[in-house]
Image (spheres, helix red, strand yellow):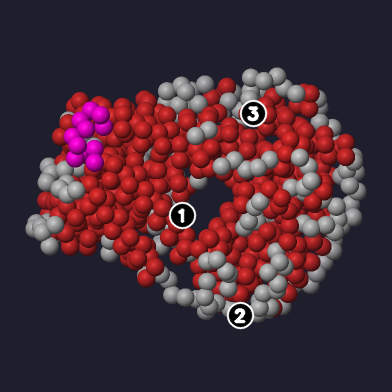
């Protein structure tokens, strides 16, 4: 009998993955107006060092120039810009004092802080990476000027791109002001319509994950608006109410996804009309007739009518609103952004501190997360790779040592993707960039051609987010232009050898046993997701019909957000080149089971709101304790499993949703117990 063909390992196919994204033409124009013109201005005025540093700053800012609202751009570009300037100040100071080999422990310290920031969110992670890259370049690139002046030039380049982002943006749509925020909320309704169209099909769970991601982006857009403006305007409050209406529709749609019965096409038409109304400013028009064939369908049609009422208003209601206010309903206010009294249940707010349950515990601070076990492991991996690459470079080529640690900086961050995939794409992109730059140098002549190549790389950079190799080509073109102007015109071909050495070092050091263990990089995120799932499940089973459901919706959003982060980490770990893979749990299976638990719990909440039989306190406690026990087992695999984990989890009679929860818990139990 012929053998079935073996599947190609994920770590081999991942380098070939290509993201399909729309072309960000506004960002392409901004990129063309940044690095190249700044470098040309420096050359034309006789200040090449200033042009190089300003162009370098605009290149680093261009990496963070992603689609979104203006305020999102201010945060996602501004914070890394400040970190880059600080890194340049540190690196240039090391160069000025002639640190020599002392640069190795200094880069280890900066690398440790940069790696630890990987667990504190994408903005802080990018800021840490660019701070490290600027420190390496400031310590190694032979540029004249005082350290503070170099940092100022770099910051000026970053701010130039930020200024262009605030000036050059897509035309305001017919919907009026808040164009970016309106587009984010409209995307939620579009994703909701796509999820409804996928109900009962094989793409239903993936559509729900896309809906969750759209809600996260809309939440971020409105949250940044509140952070940067003390008193929201009426238009902002009205938009928050419409996002709240979308969130209520999403809860009912998840219940429809759980029922897995295909829906008529007209059901998805309502959310699409709301999306068009947000983009154009016109009324949504007539909606489909309500239907009560199931509790989930009835809840969806009621939420649809409530949304129609919200869209019919031209002024917001009272700031408190119904059900705790739009910000709370939408999930834009996270559990860790509220005070301790808000996090506790009304009946539990008088409990002493030592009697709080796990879900009532105060949030962990960002600094404590950064330097927790996962943050220390991330920091050790980055710091060790950077220090080893700097030491090898100083020993082999002291005059141009900075290229090796600079290359390692963009490879070794654990949250940026699988190490093997990024290494392969980095090498391929560098080779392609060097060849293009060498060809340009052979065909072009004059002082201006490096600026032209840098401008082409800047224009390519926003488009190159589809693939890391293409992004490396754009960055290589710009960096080689800067190095050429800095006085090293023969550096292009040497970069291939330097990149090869850096990739080899990163592959060896990054796959050392402690640094390559997926449990240390994924386990804490999966554990946090399971605890958020347990908190939401407990909230569903604890909330009585007719009570404020704002807290329940906030907990659901928090659970899906944590599960999204855990899935991203698990997918990265699955694509890593790691030995002894069988000693780790199947993280994706655990995360998928937890996602289905949240889906079933959402359907349960909808059914309980419509008078379904409530589970007994013993049944609710058994389910929550089993989920907590699994999180404990994954967090500390050496500890003996508790009785809640060892005992079989029986179904809940008379409740199909909680029976599904029990089935997913039982499916997950083997992974948690074997962890």
- SS of the residue at dot 2? loop
Discs 2/1, front? 2
Location of the N terminus by quadrant is top right
Q: Nearer the viewer, residue 386 or 339?
A: 339
Percent x, y of residue 329: 69, 60
Please state the extent of the stretch shown in magenta in the rendering: 93-103
Q: Are marks 2 and 3 in contact (CB under 8 Å)?
A: no
Query: Relative to residue 94, is residue 183 depicted above or below?
Result: below
Res 503 visible: no
Tell me which residue sits at (69%, 24%) in the image. 673
Residue at 34% from the left image edge and 41% from the top image edge: 132
Near-viewer residue (261 or 587): 587
Horizontal and vertical percent position of residue 636: 63, 25
Identify the residue under disc 1.
20
Query: Whole-Å distance between the Cαs marked 1 and 3?
Result: 35 Å
Q: Earlier in the sequence, mark 2 or mark 3?
A: 2
For image coordinates 75% across by 66% down, the residue present is 322
The reply to whether callout 1 and callout 3 are in contact (CB within 8 Å) is no
In the image, farthest residue toward the left: 446
Name the residue tied to disc 2: 282
Q: Of discs 1 and 3, which sits in the foreground? A: 3
Between the C-alphas of marks 2 and 3, the distance is 51 Å
Neighbor class of circle 3 (other Cα within 10 Å; few <14, some 14-19, many 20+) is: many
Look at the numbered discs 2 and 1 and tell me whether their residues touch, using CB distance below 8 Å: no
According to the picture, the residue beneath numbered tag 3 turns out to be 634
Of the numbered discs 2 and 1, the one sitting upstream in the chain is 1
């Amino acid at each position: 009998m012929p053998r079935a063909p073996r599947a190609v390992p994920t770590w081999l196919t991942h380098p070939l993955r290509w993201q399909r994204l729309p072309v960000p033409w506004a960002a392409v124009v901004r990129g063309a107006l940044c690095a190249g013109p700044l470098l040309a201005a420096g050359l034309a005025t006789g200040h090449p060092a200033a042009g190089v540093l300003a162009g370098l700053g605009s290149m680093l800012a261009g990496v963070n120039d992603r689609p979104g609202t203006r305020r999102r751009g201010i945060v996602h570009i501004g914070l890394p810009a400040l970190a880059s300037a600080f890194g340049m100040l540190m690196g240039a100071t090391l160069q000025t004092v002639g640190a020599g080999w002392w640069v190795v422990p200094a880069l280890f310290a900066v690398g440790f802080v940069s790696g630890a920031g990987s667990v504190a969110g994408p903005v802080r992670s990018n800021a840490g990476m660019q701070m490290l890259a600027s420190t390496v370049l400031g310590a190694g690139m032979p540029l004249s000027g005082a350290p503070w002046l170099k940092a100022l030039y770099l910051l000026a380049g970053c701010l130039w791109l930020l200024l262009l982002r605030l000036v050059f943006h897509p035309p305001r749509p017919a919907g009026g002001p808040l164009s970016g925020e309106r587009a984010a909320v409209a995307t939620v309704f579009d994703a909701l319509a796509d999820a409804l169209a996928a109900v009962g099909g094989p793409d239903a769970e993936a559509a729900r994950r896309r809906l969750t991601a759209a809600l996260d982006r809309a939440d971020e857009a409105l949250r940044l608006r509140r952070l940067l403006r003390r008193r929201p305007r009426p238009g902002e409050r009205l938009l928050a109410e419409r996002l709240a209406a979308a969130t209520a529709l999403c809860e009912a749609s998840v219940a429809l996804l759980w029922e897995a019965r295909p829906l008529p096409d007209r059901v998805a038409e309502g959310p699409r009309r709301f999306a068009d109304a947000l983009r154009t400013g016109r009324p949504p028009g007539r909606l489909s007739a309500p239907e009560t064939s199931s509790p989930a369908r009835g809840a969806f049609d009621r939420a649809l009518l409530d949304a129609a009422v919200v869209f019919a208003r031209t002024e917001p209601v009272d700031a408190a609103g119904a059900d705790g206010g739009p910000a709370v309903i939408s999930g834009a206010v996270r559990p860790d952004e509220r005070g301790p009294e808000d996090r506790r249940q009304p009946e539990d707010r008088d409990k002493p501190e030592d009697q709080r349950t796990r879900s009532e515990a105060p949030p962990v601070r960002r600094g404590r997360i950064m330097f927790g076990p996962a943050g220390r492991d991330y920091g050790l991996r980055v710091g060790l790779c950077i220090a080893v690459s700097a030491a090898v470079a100083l020993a082999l080529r002291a005059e141009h040592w900075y290229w090796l640690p600079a290359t390692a900086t963009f490879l070794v961050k654990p949250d940026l993707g699988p190490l093997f995939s990024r290494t392969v794409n980095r090498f391929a992109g560098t080779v392609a960039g060097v060849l293009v730059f060498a060809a340009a140098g052979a065909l072009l002549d004059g002082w201006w051609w490096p600026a032209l190549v840098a401008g082409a790389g800047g224009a390519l950079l926003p488009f190159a987010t589809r693939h890391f190799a293409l992004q490396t080509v754009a960055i290589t073109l710009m960096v080689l232009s800067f190095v050429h102007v800095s006085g090293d015109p023969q550096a292009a071909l040497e970069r291939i050898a330097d990149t090869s050495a850096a990739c080899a070092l990163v592959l060896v050091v990054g796959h050392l046993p402690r640094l390559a263990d997926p449990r240390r990089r994924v386990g804490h995120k999966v554990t946090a997701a399971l605890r958020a799932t347990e908190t939401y499940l407990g909230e569903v089973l604890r909330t009585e019909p007719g009570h404020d459901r704002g807290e329940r919706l906030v907990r659901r959003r928090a659970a899906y957000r944590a599960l999204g982060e855990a899935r991203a980490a698990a997918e990265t770990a699955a694509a890593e080149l790691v030995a002894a893979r069988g000693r780790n749990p199947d993280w994706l299976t655990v995360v998928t089971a937890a996602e289905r638990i949240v889906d079933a719990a959402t359907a349960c909440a909808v059914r309980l709101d419509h008078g379904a039989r409530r589970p007994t306190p013993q049944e609710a406690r058994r389910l929550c304790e089993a989920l907590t026990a699994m999180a404990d087992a994954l967090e500390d695999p050496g500890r003996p499993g508790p009785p809640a984990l060892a005992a079989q989890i029986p179904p809940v009679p008379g409740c199909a949703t909680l029976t599904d929860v029990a089935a997913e818990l039982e499916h997950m139990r083997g992974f948690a117990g074997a962890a």
